[in-house]
Amino acid sequence: MKMVMAVIKPFKLDDVREALAEVGVAGITATEVKGFGRQKGHTELYRGAEYVVDFLPKIKLEIAVPDDQVEVVTEAILKAAGTGKIGDGKIFISDLERVVRIRTGELDADAL
């Protein structure tokens, strides 16, 4: 099992959710986060004063998937979240040792 974590632009959330549903993903966790990479933030004007916004709003998605779904899920996120512009985000894939469904006690792939 793998944990696929993606950091995407907020306005792409619905597109990514729909793309994941099409490839059979049963559930995702979405969190509003702030961060920066190569974008390095931007400047804004507020009441005549210019200030730097270092951290930009992003959405972090966490999706637990069986090993055989990793490539399909990654491709779905790439296609749905990509704009071709800086700040599109990143996808991180890591091993997932154990999953337990709290309600039933099911383990690992059965718990997904």
Image (tube, rainbow, N blue to C red):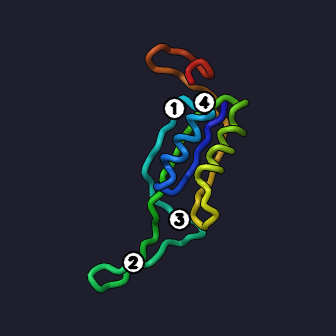
Q: Is 47 rendered above or below residue 91? A: below
Q: Is residue 92 left or right of residue 101?
A: right
Q: Helix, strand or loop at disc 1?
A: loop
Q: What residue sits right under mark 1 in the picture? A: 27
- Residue marked by disc 3: 36
Q: Are marks 3 and 1 in contact (CB under 8 Å)?
A: no
Quarter of the rendering containing residue 87:
bottom right
Q: 93 or 30, which is in the foreground?
A: 30
Q: Position of residue 14 (x, y in %)?
A: 48, 46
Q: Is residue 74 left or right of residue 104?
A: right
Q: Earlier in the sequence, mark 2 or mark 3?
A: 3
Give the foreground label among 3 and 4.
Answer: 4
Which of marks 1 and 3 precedes in the sequence?
1
How much space separates mark 2 and mark 4, taking CA atoms? 41 Å
**Residue bearing the label numbered 4:** 24
Identify the residue shown where x is 56% and y is 21%: 111
Foreground mark, 2 or 4, reads: 4
Q: Secondary structure at mark 2?
A: strand
Q: Secondary structure at mark 4?
A: loop
The residue type indicated by label 4 comes to Gly
The quadrant holding residue 68 is top right
Specify the amino acid type for callout 3. Phe
Type of the residue with mark 1? Gly
Mark 2 crowd level (few <14, some 14–19, many ≥20, 10 Å Cα): few
Tags 2 and 3 in contact by the CB under 8 Å rule? no
At numbered mark 3, what does the secondary structure look like: helix, strand or loop?
Answer: loop
In this view of the protein, which residue sits in the foreground, 106 or 47?
47
